[in-house]
Amino acid sequence: MGKDLADNFTCAKRVFEEASDSLGFDIAAMCFSGSEDDLKLTANTQPAILTASVAALRVVEQETDLKPTFVAGHSLGEYSALVCTGVLSLADAVRTVRQRGTFMQQAVPVGVGAMAAIMGIEGPDLEQLCYDAAEGEVVSPANFNSPGQIVIAGHATAVERAMTLAKERGAKRALSLPVSAPFHSSLMAPAAIRLDTVLSEIAIGDFTCPVVGNVEAAPYQEPERVKPLLVEQVCAPVRWEESVLKMRELGVERFVEIGPGKVLSGLVKRIAKGTEVQNVADVASLKKL
């Protein structure tokens, strides 16, 4: 993850070095040759993806004349977006998301929480389904990803009941996700409280362009709103479909996903049909861009 760009661009290599200095361990080694088990730990996953994303961003900034009108990110990606627009420094961002990952993992014991993707049931119907399946436990929509694709999260037993109920009510698929905690559910409240303390100690810079945030699915660029929204984001659902539609409504015709993977590119193509969608994760995709 990110090795191709770091091997070919000094600016990308410097990002990995800066992140490693900030974290106190070699994040480049973890990204380039770390074990799958290590990278699956959310305390490692979050700074690794953020670092690789910012490395790709710095290459795009150096090698192209692209300037964003808006930036947005899915969950963890909102931190990458805030680095892109100048609000967070890379050093503060990687330290914060490492702690964010640790807090999220510690909020719920392994095996107690779960997440699942439900395909073919729209938002209001799925919210009712979760209410019906809860039976005194927690299960709720966590990621509104694209039309007909919503992720739910909560207690593992409640998520299992919701998956069964979804199939009975006509879902095309109900798929358990291999995650380590029930992200973006009320079970993450202890993590949000601890994150608030960490965020209180970091500096917030000026915006170079608005961020379309996960919590409100609307642009914001007031420095005093950054920390409260990042804290709220821990328990609130990611409103990605609405975020993309809002950018489209505001005139965006081209989306560029920066960082490892192409998941968001696929979601955007389903949400905003007819827009130009590209991604940059390595040298080949940079050349294509």
Image (cartoon, rainbow, N blue to C red):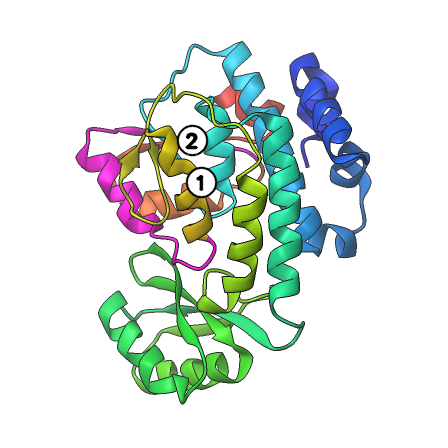
* Identity, as a three-letter code, of the amino acid under mark 2: Gln
Foreground of the two, 281 or 49: 49
Circle on res. 265: none
* Identity, as a three-letter code, of the amino acid under mark 1: Lys
Say few, some or many: other residues with alpha carbon within 10 Å of mark 1 (under 14 / 14 to 19 / 20 or more). some
Task: Residue under label 2, please give it.
Answer: 278
- Foreground mark, 2 or 1? 1
Determine if residue 25 is in view: yes
The number of numbered badges drawn on the structure is 2
Task: Residue under label 1, please give it.
Answer: 227
Question: In the rendered view, would you say 89 is above or below 149?
Answer: above
Q: SS of the residue at dot 1?
A: helix
Q: CA distance from mark 2 to mark 1?
A: 30 Å
Location of residue 262 in the rendering, given as x and y in whole percent from the top left corner: 50, 41
Q: Which residues are magenta?
A: 234-259
Foreground of the two, 248 or 228: 228
Q: Is residue 79 left or right of residue 173?
A: right
Residue depicted at x 60% and y 27% = 90
Location of residue 130 in the rendering, given as x and y in whole percent from the top left corner: 35, 78
Residue depicted at x 37% and y 47% = 214
Determine if residue 272 is in view: no
Location of residue 154 in the rendering, given as x and y in whole percent from the top left corner: 48, 73
Say few, some or many: other residues with alpha carbon within 10 Å of mark 2 (under 14 / 14 to 19 / 20 or more). many
Q: SS of the residue at dot 2?
A: strand
Magenta stretch holds residue 137: no
Foreground of the two, 260 or 103: 103
Residue depicted at x 43% and y 51% = 233
